[in-house]
Amino acid sequence: MKHWYVARTKPNSEDRAQWHLRNQGFETYLPRYRKQIRHARKVQTVLRALFPGYIFVSIDTKHQNWASINGTVGVVSLVQFGDRPEPVSAGIIDAIRDGEEKGVVKVAPQGLKKGDRIVVREGVFAEHTALFEEECDEKRSFLLLDLMGRSVRVNVESEHLMAIS
């Protein structure tokens, strides 16, 4: 029976490790999110590993030689406790995949989900309540704010948001 395990990768080698593991017949999962980076006055959206330095590998420990993973290009080792790798709950993989949209994990600041009620703590919309819509990059989020009787989509700094219980 297959279970998911975690393999630690060499720095910035998640893609290389995934490629080599798949060539060996292992099923892998490398969750990614979109990140905006700025360089020389240009803004570019790139895909980054959700868990830098780690990749998930599905292994049937009775029928697959899992020890070969430790010698795979790009891999440091499987995460082990004692002499055997420790499986990850399938629920964790399912939860991450449920958060994907078109193969990319939607990351919300402070654990916010679409539709969560929030209050803006600072800035132009300070003290207003709103509904969280989505994160637009690592620093800003879109909200649905009730202004003058209608919902308006606004863009605010994520650090100024606080969830309402």
Image (spheres, rainbow, N blue to C red):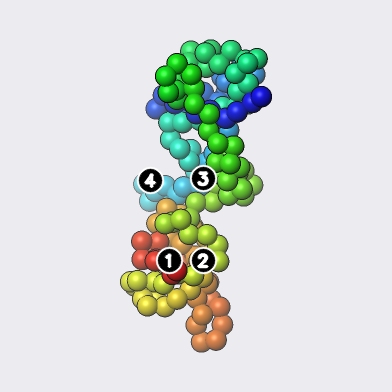
Report the quarter where the C terminus lies: bottom left
Mark 1 Cα within 10 Å, few/some/many (few <14, many 20+)? some
Query: Label 4: which residue?
Result: 39
Mark 2 Cα within 10 Å, few/some/many (few <14, many 20+)? some
Say whether disc 3 or disc 2 marks the residue closer to the N-terminus. Answer: 3
Query: Label 1: which residue?
Result: 163
Q: Secondary structure at mark 2?
A: loop
- For residue 119, side relative to residue 69 (left or right): left
Tag shown at residue 89: none
Q: Where does residue 89 sit, x and y in percent of width and height?
A: 55, 36
The reply to whether the C-beta atoms of the residues labelled 1 and 2 are less than 8 Å apart is yes
Three-letter amino acid code of the residue under disc 1: Ala
Label 1 to label 4: alpha-carbon separation = 32 Å
Say whether disc 2 or disc 4 marks the residue closer to the N-terminus. Answer: 4
Q: Where does residue 49 sit, x and y in percent of width and height?
A: 48, 38
Residue situated furthest left in the rendering: 122
Three-letter amino acid code of the residue under disc 2: Asp
Label 3 to label 1: alpha-carbon separation = 22 Å
Query: Label 2: which residue?
Result: 116
Mark 3 Cα within 10 Å, few/some/many (few <14, many 20+)? some
